[in-house]
């Protein structure tokens, strides 16, 4: 008797059931970071890194958003220039990577192929990921000396 076992080698592109799609949003984002850099006269070039947190909202088409507080990390770089005694101008870039959140509405946001027996087939996938790319421009007033 010859038996054949089919193992899926590549994953199936995420798809949704019944025309539903998964939506991801965030209504707030906060960071706690350290800056390190080098100053030349009135110019500071710096790197920044630290932790990040946000309220990640997930939903399927036509359903209300679920709120999931998620935490991750952030890193970036920037330039700050002293314009006058108390005034500085800065431009910075931040990349924020938050942990995976779930879209738990009782059915899946998408499907993944499973290639390891006994789970060969298609499994529901409720994980969503949120990354942010942020460019900030700022004018700062510094008190004191």
Image (cartoon, helix red, strand yellow):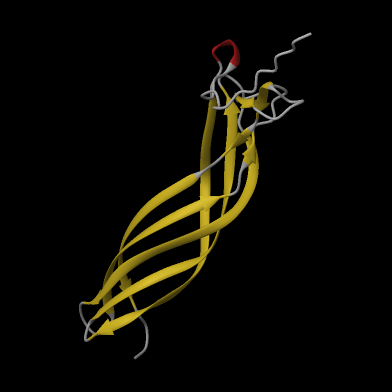
Q: Residue furthest bottom?
A: 145
- Which quadrant: the C terminus? bottom left
Question: Residue 123: horizontal and vertical position, in percent?
Answer: 68, 24
Say left or right for 134 vs 31.
left
- On screen, 135 above or below 41? above
**Residue at image coords 29%, 78%:** 44
Q: Quadrant of residue 39?
A: bottom left
Residue at x 64%, y 48% (from the top left corner)? 69
Q: On the rendered structure, is 75 left or right of 56?
A: left
Q: Please state the total of marks drawn on the protein image.
A: 0
Report the residue at 52% width, 49% height from top: 28
Q: Identify which residue, 61 or 4, lies in the foreground.
A: 4
Q: Nearer the viewer, residue 92 or 87?
A: 92
From what the image shows, is residue 137 above or below residue 132? Answer: below
The N terminus: image quadrant: top right
Quadrant in the picture for residue 101: top right
* Residue furthest top as drawn: 1
> In which quadrant of the rendered view does residue 58 lie?
top right
Q: Measured along the vertical axis of the image, is residue 82 above or below residue 69?
A: below
Left-right relation of 109 to 84: right
In the image, residue 62 lies at what x, y percent? Answer: 57, 19
Q: Residue furthest front?
A: 1
Return the residue nearer the eye: 62 or 140: 62
Measured from the top left, where is residue 102 in percent x and y?
Answer: 66, 36
Indicate the position of residue 107 as horizontal and vertical percent values.
69, 21
């Amino acid at each position: 008797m010859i038996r054949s076992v089919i193992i899926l080698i590549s994953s199936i592109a995420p798809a949704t059931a019944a025309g539903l799609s998964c939506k991801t949003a965030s209504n707030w984002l906060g960071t706690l970071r350290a800056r390190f850099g080098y100053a030349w006269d009135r110019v500071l070039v710096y790197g920044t890194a630290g932790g990040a947190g946000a309220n990640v909202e997930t939903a399927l088409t036509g359903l209300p958003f679920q709120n999931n507080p998620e935490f991750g990390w952030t890193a970036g770089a920037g330039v700050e220039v002293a314009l006058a005694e108390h005034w500085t101008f800065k431009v910075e870039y931040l990349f924020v990577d938050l942990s995976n959140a779930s879209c738990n509405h009782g059915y899946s946001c998408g499907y993944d192929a499973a290639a390891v027996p006994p789970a060969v087939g298609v499994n529901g996938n409720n994980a969503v990921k949120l990354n942010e790319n942020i460019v900030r421009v700022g004018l700062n007033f510094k008190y004191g000396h």
